[in-house]
Image: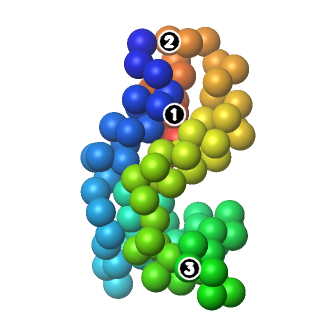
Amino acid sequence: MHSVQHIAKEIVAREGGYVNDPDDPGGATKFGVTIHTMRRLGLDLDRDGDVDTQDVRKLTREDAVEIFIQHYFVKPQIDLLPAELQASVFDMYV
């Protein structure tokens, strides 16, 4: 089985870079992390007092991997599931 780090990196690679499609209810997104997630987590990467599209643009691959591991794997306790289920559930949860 692949490590959670490896799986998160694969998800980030698959999700791609910055997009802001007005028809997508997710809003501005980079590496699969939406502006809504960044606002919920308070990720003001440019430190201007708000979380906006500029913060989404500043998101790095490493930031996205860490968000997925901490908030989509550890926090919902996917790490407590049987090992053979973790990768699939993690990928679906993201």
**Residue identifier under label 3:** 46
Q: Amino acid at mark 1?
A: Phe
Against 84, residue 35 (above or below) is below
Q: Residue furthest front?
A: 47
**Residue identifier under label 2:** 84
Against 41, residue 89 (above or below) is above
* Side of 43 where 92 appears, left or right: left
Question: Number of numbered discs present?
Answer: 3
Against 30, residue 5 (above or below) is above
**Residue at the location (68% across, 87% down)?**
49
Image coordinates for residue 73, horizontal then vertical, percent: 60, 36
Q: Nearer the viewer, mark 1 or mark 3?
A: 3
The figure's colour scheme reads rainbow
> Mark 2, residues whose alpha carbon is within 10 Å: few (<14), some, or many (≥20)?
few
**Residue identifier under label 1:** 90
Give the mark, 1 or 3, whose residue is nearer the N terminus.
3
In space, the residues marked 1 and 2 are separated at their CA atoms by 11 Å
In space, the residues marked 1 and 3 are separated at their CA atoms by 29 Å
**Residue at the location (56% across, 12% down)?**
83
Image coordinates for residue 56, horizontal then vertical, percent: 46, 73
In terms of secondary structure, where does tag 2 sit? helix
Q: Amino acid at mark 2?
A: Glu
In space, the residues marked 3 and 2 are separated at their CA atoms by 39 Å
Q: Which mark is residue 4?
A: none
In terms of secondary structure, where does tag 1 sit? helix
Give the mark, 1 or 2, whose residue is nearer the N terminus.
2
State if disc 2 and disc 3 touch (CB < 8 Å). Answer: no
**Residue at the location (31% across, 72% down)?**
19
